[in-house]
Amino acid sequence: MHIAWIGKKSPFCGNVTYSREVTNALLDRGHQVSFLHFAQEESDPHNWPDCPEVTLPFLYKSQVYTIPSLKATKVLTESLRQLKPDLVHASLTLSPLDFLLPEICAELNLPLIATFHTPFSSKGAKLKSGTQLLAYQLYAPFLVNYDRVIIFSQVQRDLLARLGVPAENVAVIPNGVDVQKYSPGPSKIKAELKAERLFVYQGRLATEKNVEALLRAWKQSEMQPGSKLLVVGDGPLTPALKPFYGPEYGILWMGFVADENRRLEILRGCDAFILPSLVEGLSISLLEAMACGLACLATNVGADGEVLENGAGILLNPRRVTSQLSTLLPLFQDHPELTTLLGQKARKRVLERYTLSRNITQLERLYNQVLEQRQSSGVMSYKF
């Protein structure tokens, strides 16, 4: 099967990881993939699939959204016309081009599937945040025109249903992680950092990630000198936070780590992973940490609550992160057996539900369903 994949290659974020891992896995399964994206020279070629690429012109792009140039629509349309894929799969990038894709694919008579990554809060919560409300309300009328929309949990399906997206248009396929690559293993990071107990946050440093709540809790907990908190990542809040939460409190800022092997070494050497977000989709960083056998603490937002439910980790109330962590951090510091047990449960949960292999099998099944439905309804793929 030939899949035209539309996604991101930079800057680094969960959407980028999703595109890289899924396209590599599709190629490993014997499919043909053409990658259309907004990135150019800044991506690391060693981590990316060896497949035909089309770079789409853009005016601006960030970890959150992309503004294509006026030529992007024409470049995309002509590229799809020449590539002749069996279907198009768009890992939506919060770009105006997302809204034009149904029209473009309808013109070419190509099946169109989307993965909708936009984060959300918790089960039963109203769409209160400005970004959430705007994104969901803007996208819902257009998602109806996709053959299928992939989301990560039943909670997210319910949110879309409230905005008019029919359930039959939606497929729940959780993110997956390569459990052979992301697995427990040796690491020298503790010796390198002279740490006895090591805790880690990995992700963007932006308001919705609520990192300051974690930093305040760490500072208030007065952790022992041998305990360290690693902050892995970068973002707009770095300059505002870093001066006030430094090494004198056992907080080490590692910045953005591009090398995947280095990120893997960091995870394998840590005792606990903490994700204090106010909103999430389904955090790939969380799944990677769980697969490496870390005890995980995360807020009950997005699909992360489903990932950690029933004892696979500790769920935090997003409105009480600082107070809860102030109690839990010393507990996890002083009881290694607790982090070991939770790490084992986290790894088991990923193996049961969130492997990349399982994700790709579900994706292949969805592709075939969409193509078969098109054929049975008399809507055939575009013949060039």
Image (tube, helix red, strand yellow):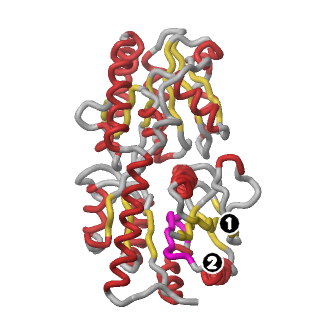
Tell me whether circle 1 and circle 2 mark residues in contact (CB < 8 Å): yes
- Quarter location, residue 242: top right
Q: Position of residue 287 (x, y in %)?
A: 43, 39
Question: What residue is at 46 percent from the left and 14 percent from the top?
Answer: 222
Q: Which residues are magenta?
A: 85-95
**Residue depicted at x 60% and y 65%:** 66
Q: What type is the residue that disc 2 sits on? A: Leu
Residue that mark 2 sits on = 83
Instruction: Judge left or right: residue 326 versus residue 14.
Output: left
Query: Between marks 1 and 2, how big is the CA–CA gap?
Result: 9 Å
Q: Nearer the viewer, residue 144 or 324?
A: 144
Residue 276 inside the magenta-drawn segment: no
Q: Nearer the viewer, residue 302 or 359?
A: 359
Label 2 Cα crowd, 10 Å radius (few <14 / some 14-19 / many 20+): few
Left or right of 94 in this view: 304: left
Image quadrant where residue 74 sits = bottom right
In this picture, residue 171 sits left or right of residue 276: left
What secondary structure is found at the residue carrying circle 1?
loop
The residue nearer to you, when weighing 281 against 381, is 381
